Amino acid sequence: MWLVLAIVAMLCWSGSDFFSKLGSKPSDKYSHWKMVIAVGVVMGIHAFYEMATGTKVTMQDIIYYMPASSMYILSMIFGYVSLRYIELSVSSPICNSSGAIAAILCFLVLGQTVDSLSTIGIVIVSAGVIFLGIAEYTEDDEAKMKRQLKANRKYTKSVLAILLPILYCIIDALGTFFDAVILEEGNTFMTNVFHYLDEDVANVAYELTFLFMAVVAFIYVFVIKKQKLSALSFKEEGPKGLGAICETAGQFAYVYALAANSVGAAPIICAYCVVSSVWSSIFLKERLSWKHYASLVAVVGGIIIMGVAESLAEL
């Protein structure tokens, strides 16, 4: 059963990447906030279902988990913005390399050990991201336009395009770090600063916080900025809803897959950015240079190595 759940998580999160990309229109400067609304609503529905079936969450739990949930939500906002400026094939692997930074933070602050295999993965991921950024920014404008001829969208070279997924990576890593602090029972740093939470409670607390953020985003877009609700259409906004469903379903499958067999599940789930790149290549007609692909192979390889290392540590 764990294998099915791991594959579901991998497919759902790659689907979330793909549909979020479809829903992120370069011409709509509020598309990332609309994506937040969609994800918050779906997560809110799931949170209420979990509470109705026995998960007890208090306001205190939501506040305790706020350091992690706020980082995850903020990183996702940057991720949604980045999809307006850069190919999904480039953005997804960079975003998914946050585990390398999280591992470094846990090593430096919490004193957790980093085994040799994880260290190799961290070095490979870091080098891959650096070379990916160099490949993206130094590419000749004419060569960039030529390889984008068949793509559904055209992108111009900019620092912002590569900076946004890197910001996602760093902020998401902070969320993972706070998770390690809050969800690891017996952590001395946690007992002095934070309150321990069970994983199911923390997950619902996160989803309720996302729902609150969706309400804030709705007020900002449709009340303060006076965007017209009547202008929304299923063709334009439908992909956002599908992306939100995939994101929530992937998170649900991820939790139970790791709980059942983290050794086998982690490397499979870590590869979801590879599937995202496949979808973008098939349906969005994205084409990259050999330098991009070489860097992406390094990033993905490093991520999978880290996933394997984390799994072996659980044995």
Image: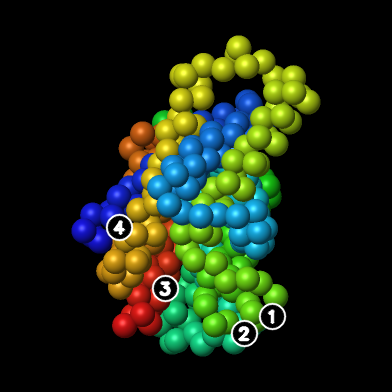
Do we see residue 78 in this rendering? yes
Q: Tag on residue 192?
A: 1
The quarter of the picture where residue 135 lies is bottom right
Q: Which of marks 1 and 3 is in front?
A: 1
Tell me which label, 2 or 4, sits earlier in the chain.
4
Indicate the position of residue 17 as horizontal and vertical percent values: 45, 43
Within 10 Å of disc 2 (Cα), the crowding (few <14, some 14-19, many 20+) is few
Indicate the position of residue 107 as horizontal and vertical percent values: 58, 82
Q: CA–CA distance between discs 2 and 1?
A: 6 Å
- Residue type for callout 3: Met
* Residue at the image position 40 percent from the left and 47 percent from the top: 53
- Residue type for callout 2: Thr
| Mark 3 lies on residue | 306
Mark 2–mark 1 CB contact (< 8 Å): yes
Tell me which label, 3 or 4, sits earlier in the chain.
4
Q: CA–CA distance between discs 4 and 1?
A: 35 Å
Tell me which label, 2 or 3, sits earlier in the chain.
2
Marks counted in the figure total 4
Q: Tell me which colouring the rendered structure shows.
A: rainbow
| Mark 4 lies on residue | 6
Mark 2–mark 3 CB contact (< 8 Å): no
Q: Is mark 4 on a helix, strand or loop?
A: helix
Mark 1–mark 3 CB contact (< 8 Å): no
Q: CA–CA distance between discs 1 and 3?
A: 29 Å
Q: Nearer the viewer, mark 3 or mark 4?
A: 4
Within 10 Å of disc 1 (Cα), the crowding (few <14, some 14-19, many 20+) is few
Vertical arrangement, residue 272 with respect to residue 183, above or below: above
